[in-house]
C-alpha cells in the first residue's frame, strides 16, 4: 500500500491556549472551614450539623454530606443534641450564637477570621456611638451575619452609589463604614468614595475589609481577561466572590461564564475561541478546575500558561474547640 494515501481517522484538534489565573480557588478561610467539619467528623463521628453551606460550593457540600455532615439553614431544624453544630465561614448573627448557648448546643464557629474582623470593627464603632454603614449585598449570609452583630437598626446597608445618595442621618458627625469581604474591589471603591464625599467625617477600616483572597483573585483575572477571547470562572452561582470574578473579567473585556463543573460548559460558545482564561472562586476546589481542563483537552490541543498576580501564604488555625484534638 502507498503510505502516502493513509489518512488519520482522528481529526486534528484545534489549538487552544489556556491562561490559568493564579491565585485561584480555595482561600485560607475556606480551607479552615472545611477542615473544621472534617476534624469534627473525625473526632465526634457522624452526624455533625452545619448551619448553612459551610462554603458556597455544591461539590464541597455534597462531599461533606457523604461523610456524615448534615446541613441545615436554622438551628430550629436541629434536635436537642450533644453533637457539634458548626457555623459556616460566612459568619452568623449574634442571635444564633445566643440560641445555641441557650440550647446548650456544642457550637463550633468556623466563621472566617477576616469576617470576624469586620464584626469586631462594627462593634467598636457602635460602642463609640457611631451609626454603621455596611457596604454589601442584601441577603448574603455574610451581610446578615455582620448586621446581626448589632441591635436592629444600628447598621444601614448600602449596595450602590445611588443608595449612598439616599442616606439620611440626624447626626452626620458620628458615622463609620465597613464592607463585605468579597465585593468587587472597583465597585466598592466607588461606593466608599461616594460615602466619603457625602460624609467627609465618616470613619473607615484601618485595613481594607475586602479580604486578601478576593483582592488577589480579582487582580489575576484582570490581568488575564484582556489577553483572552473568553474567561471561565469555576464557582457556584451563590458564591459572591465567584460572581465578582465573572463581572471583573467582563469589565476587563472578556465574555465570562460561571460554571460549577465540566457538565455545565456550553461548548457552542467555544467554537471560535483560541485563548481562554480560567479562574476559580475562593470556595471552588482545584479538582473542578482540573476536570474542566481535561474536558478542554479532549476537544482542543491545549497549551497552558500560568499567570501569577500574587503569591499567598495565609493560614488560619482550626477553631479552638477542635485545636486540642488536632
Ligand atoms: S473569601 Fe476571604 S473572607 Fe471569605 S473565607 Fe476566604 S479569606 Fe475569608
Image (cartoon, rainbow, N blue to C red):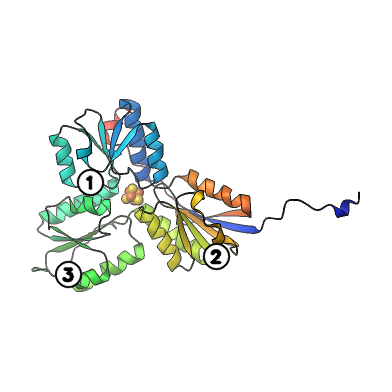
Say whether mark 3 is within 8 Å of ligand 1.
no
Query: Mark 3, residues whose alpha carbon is within 10 Å: few (<14), some, or many (≥20)?
Result: few
Q: Which residue is mark 2?
A: 229
Q: Quadrant of the C terminus?
A: top left
Q: Which residue is disc 3 drawn over?
A: 167
Q: Residue at x 25, y 29 (%)?
A: 83
Q: Residue at x 25, y 72 (%)?
A: 162
In the rendered image, residue 275, in percent from the top left (x then y), is placed at 58, 61
Q: Quadrant of residue 170?
A: bottom left
Is label 2 in a helix, a strand or a loop? Answer: loop
Q: Is residue 274 left or right of residue 128?
A: right
Q: Position of residue 59 (x, y in %)?
A: 42, 43
Q: Residue at x 22, y 42 (%)?
A: 74
Q: For this view, does 194 lie left or right of residue 213?
A: left
Give the Cα separation between the discs numbered 2 and 3. Answer: 41 Å
Per the image, the residue denoted by label 1 is: 92
Reading the chain from its start, which is encountered first: label 2 or label 3?
3
- The kind of secondary structure element at disc 1 is loop
- Find residue 156 and report its image quarter: bottom left
Q: Distance between the Cα atoms at labels 1 and 2? A: 40 Å
Assess whether mark 3 and mark 1 are in contact (beta carbons under 8 angstroms): no
Q: Is residue 287 above or below residue 159?
A: above
Q: Residues within 10 Å of mark 1 (few under 14, many from 20)?
A: many
User: At 18% across and 43% down in the image, what residue appears?
Assistant: 96
Q: Earlier in the sequence, mark 1 or mark 2?
A: 1
Quick one: label 1 or label 3, which is nearer the N terminus? 1
Amino acid at each position: 500500500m502507498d503510505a502516502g494515501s493513509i489518512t488519520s481517522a482522528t481529526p486534528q484538534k484545534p489549538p487552544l491556549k489556556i491562561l490559568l489565573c493564579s491565585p485561584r480557588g480555595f482561600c485560607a478561610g475556606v480551607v479552615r472551614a472545611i477542615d473544621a467539619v472534617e476534624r469534627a467528623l473525625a473526632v465526634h463521628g457522624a452526624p455533625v450539623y452545619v448551619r448553612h453551606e459551610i462554603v458556597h460550593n455544591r461539590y464541597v457540600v455534597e462531599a461533606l454530606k457523604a461523610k456524615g455532615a448534615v446541613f441545615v439553614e436554622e438551628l430550629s431544624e436541629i434536635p436537642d443534641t450533644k453533637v457539634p453544630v458548626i457555623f459556616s465561614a460566612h459568619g452568623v448573627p449574634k442571635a444564633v450564637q445566643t440560641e445555641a448557648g441557650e440550647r446548650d448546643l456544642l457550637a463550633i464557629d468556623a466563621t472566617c477570621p477576616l469576617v470576624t474582623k469586620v464584626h469586631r470593627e462594627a462593634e467598636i464603632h457602635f460602642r463609640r456611638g457611631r451609626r454603621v454603614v455596611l457596604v454589601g449585598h442584601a441577603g448574603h449570609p455574610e451581610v446578615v451575619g455582620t448586621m446581626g452583630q448589632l441591635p436592629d437598626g444600628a447598621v444601614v446597608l448600602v449596595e450602590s452609589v445611588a443608595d449612598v445618595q439616599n442616606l439620611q442621618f440626624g447626626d452626620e458627625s458620628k458615622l463609620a463604614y465597613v464592607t463585605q469581604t468579597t465585593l468587587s474591589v472597583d465597585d466598592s471603591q466607588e461606593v466608599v468614595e461616594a460615602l466619603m464625599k457625602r460624609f467627609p467625617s465618616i470613619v473607615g477600616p484601618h485595613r481594607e475589609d475586602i479580604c486578601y483572597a478576593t483582592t488577589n483573585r480579582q487582580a489575576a483575572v484582570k490581568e488575564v481577561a484582556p489577553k483572552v477571547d473568553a474567561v471561565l470562572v469555576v464557582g457556584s452561582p451563590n458564591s459572591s466572590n465567584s460572581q465578582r470574578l465573572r463581572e471583573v473579567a467582563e469589565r476587563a473585556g472578556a465574555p465570562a461564564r460561571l460554571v460549577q463543573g465540566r457538565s455545565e460548559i456550553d461548548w457552542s460558545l467555544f467554537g471560535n475561541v483560541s485563548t481562554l482564561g480560567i479562574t476559580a472562586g475562593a470556595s471552588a476546589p482545584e479538582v473542578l478546575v482540573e476536570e474542566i481542563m481535561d474536558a478542554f483537552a479532549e476537544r482542543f490541543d491545549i497549551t497552558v500558561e500560568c499567570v501569577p498576580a500574587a503569591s499567598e501564604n495565609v493560614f488560619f488555625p482550626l477553631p479552638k474547640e477542635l485545636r486540642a484534638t488536632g
